[in-house]
Image (tube, rainbow, N blue to C red):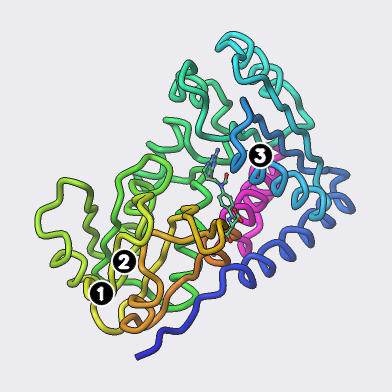
Amino acid sequence: MTAQIIDGKAFAATVRAKVATHVARLKEENNLTPGLAVVLVGEDPASQVYVRSKGKQTIEAGMKSVEHRLDPDTTEDALLTLIKQLNDDATIHGILVQLPLPAHLDEDLVINAIDPAKDVDGFHISNVGLLGTGQKSMVPCTPLGCLMMLRDHHGSLSGLDAVVIGRSNIVGKPMAQLLLGDSCTVTIAHSRTKDLPDVVRRADIVVAAVGRPQMVPGDWIKPGATVIDVGINRIDAEGGKTRLVGDVDYESCAAVAGAITPVPGGVGPMTIACLLANTVTACCRANGLAEPKDLTV
Ligand SMILES: Nc1nc2c(c(=O)[nH]1)N[C@@H](CN(C=O)c1ccc(C(=O)N[C@@H](CCC(=O)O)C(=O)O)cc1)CN2
């Protein structure tokens, strides 16, 4: 079998086009422009790339983009003061603090300082609790993008066996909640899971989010299963160059799977598209308007 490639880049373009349509309508009918503020602390090269893409795509969708680039040695107090300022700014509907933060900053403290209604990353403890109890929340962008691609590919996910490899707060745990919400039978596997290959082999859906390059080989995959690769790892390549690979070994997994997301061009672009969609949703909620139903389903 050769797997169908799930084209996240193309899918993300359709989501961004829908976002732009809603933004235009909000302007025309309600005189509103959704605003997204992105805060980057430090100079991590990958984070700088992601923050630049977020700003560019926010503007392309017709929204207001604000970027705050802070020194690597920014104090917690200074960062919390900025977040309070953004919480109080009525022209800003979404706030995102790019992760990871430098080690001297307390990530939980910083994230929980964001107004939950503006937490377009869905990482605030209130949004985590709302998602976990099946209530209306802000849904973390990467898992949301994965869910959208899975629903698009499968139609209904009800009754399918899903294994999420990785238990991070950003991807693994919310991904498991979303799959459970769609009535999958969900296993969260991690570094201490016994017989990991056998656990993965039972799955109709495998979401790999461990951050270890090419960790999942094709012989762990059930024939016909859907493989969603969340990993973005830069490894050495020929000629002193580097290249991006995921958490699954693409060639061997694609030979067995029914469908697979590539890296690059799979989950990554959907993360930013969902961020834009969440910002529109936050803007609608803040203004008591009906939220677009077609953006993230
Ligand atoms: N506050 C947050 N921090 C981080 C998040 C997040 O959702 N919120 N996720 C990741 C990084 N990330 C967005 O911030 C992100 C990662 C990758 C991509 C992407 O489009 N990747 C491309 C490849 C890009 C490249 O060449 O390096 C792809 O996969 O095709 C977008 C966003 C951690 N931090």
Marks 1 & 2, CB-CB < 8 Å contact = yes
Residue 241 position by quadrant: bottom right
* Position of residue 126 measured from the top left corner of the image (x, y, whole percent): 44, 31
Residue type marked 2: Val
What x and y, as percent, mark residue 156? 39, 75
Left or right of 33 on screen, residue 3: left
The disc, 1 or 3, on the residue closer to the chain's N-terminal end is 3
* Horizontal arrangement in the rendering, residue 292 relative to residue 114 (left or right): right
Assign a secondary structure to mark 3. Answer: helix
Quickly name the residue at label 3.
Answer: 48
> Residue 194: which quarter of the image?
bottom left
Q: Which of the labelled discs sits on residue 206, or is there none?
A: 2
Q: Which residue is found at the position 75% from the left and 52% from the top?
A: 57
Specify start and end residues of the magenta stretch as a single range.
271-295
Quadrant in which the C terminus is drawn: bottom right
Question: How many residues crowd mark 2 within 10 Å: few (<14), some (14–19), many (20+)?
Answer: many
Q: Residues within 10 Å of mark 1 (few under 14, many from 20)?
A: many
Q: Is mark 3 within 8 Å of ligand 1?
A: no
Q: CA distance from mark 3 to mark 2?
A: 30 Å
From the viewer's perspective, is the residue at label 3 or at label 2 nearer? 3
Label 1 vs label 3, nearer the camera? 3
Q: Closer to the camera, 215 or 158?
A: 215
